[in-house]
Image: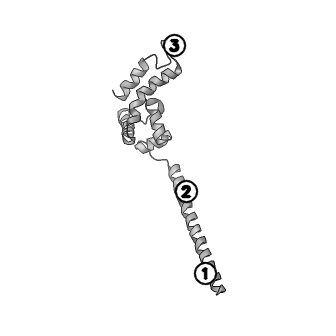
Amino acid sequence: MNQRELKQSIEENPNLTDSEKADPDLTVAEKNRMLRDIRAPYYQMSDEELLQLIRDFVAENGRVPERKDLIYDVVIKQRFGPWGRAMERAGVRPVAQKYLEKKRRRTERKQLAKERRRLLREEKEMEAARLEEAAE
């Protein structure tokens, strides 16, 4: 069953939607359990398989999916974090320049801090050697 057929079967099942035809005795927890059972196969998939499903959606529909378009959106969010990052990992949306710039600045700050620590360590070693030399 492909994604479109799966979505349609969910929409047609009155117990899984907010339909007036839904079983009145069905609790929200039971409805959520039924949806979780439908999503269960997606939890078993590898990261690459999930990303390929996103790529397939884009190829089929010609647009980047929104969370409401995919039944396995919860799985994607759990595995890859924010929705935008998941779309970037799938390669269907370019990586945000703001994110790349922030990442670059963070790396530069780490390198500068590392260099400062190295210089301080060398200064302490030189001072210790000078004191030792003066004591002799």
Q: Secondary structure at mark 1?
A: helix
Q: In whole angstroms, how far apart are the C-alphas of marks 3 and 2?
A: 54 Å
The residue nearer to you, when weighing 84 against 129, is: 129
> Amino acid under label 3?
Asp
- Kind of residue at badge 1: Ala
**Residue at the extreme bottom of the image, as rendered:** 136
At 50% from the left and 18% from the top, the residue drawn is 18
Q: Which residue is mark 1?
A: 129
The Cα atoms of the two marked residues, 3 and 1, are separated by 82 Å
Residue 25 disc label: 3
Residue 2, relative to residue 102: is it above or below?
Answer: above
Does residue 126 appear to the left or right of 26 in the view shown? right
> What SS does tag 2 mark?
helix
Please tell me which residue lies in front, 22 or 7: 22
The local secondary structure at tag 3 comes to loop
Q: Residues within 10 Å of mark 1 (few under 14, many from 20)?
A: few
Query: Where does label 2 land, which residue?
Result: 106
Sequence order check, earlier mark of 3 and 1? 3
Residue drawn at x 52%, y 49% is 99
Asked whether, in this view, residue 95 is left or right of residue 60, the answer is right
- Residue lying furthest left: 1
In-image side of 84 versus 6 (left or right): right
Q: In 3D space, how far apart are the residues under numbered discs 2 and 1 (Cα atoms)?
A: 35 Å
- 68 w.r.t. 81: above or below: above
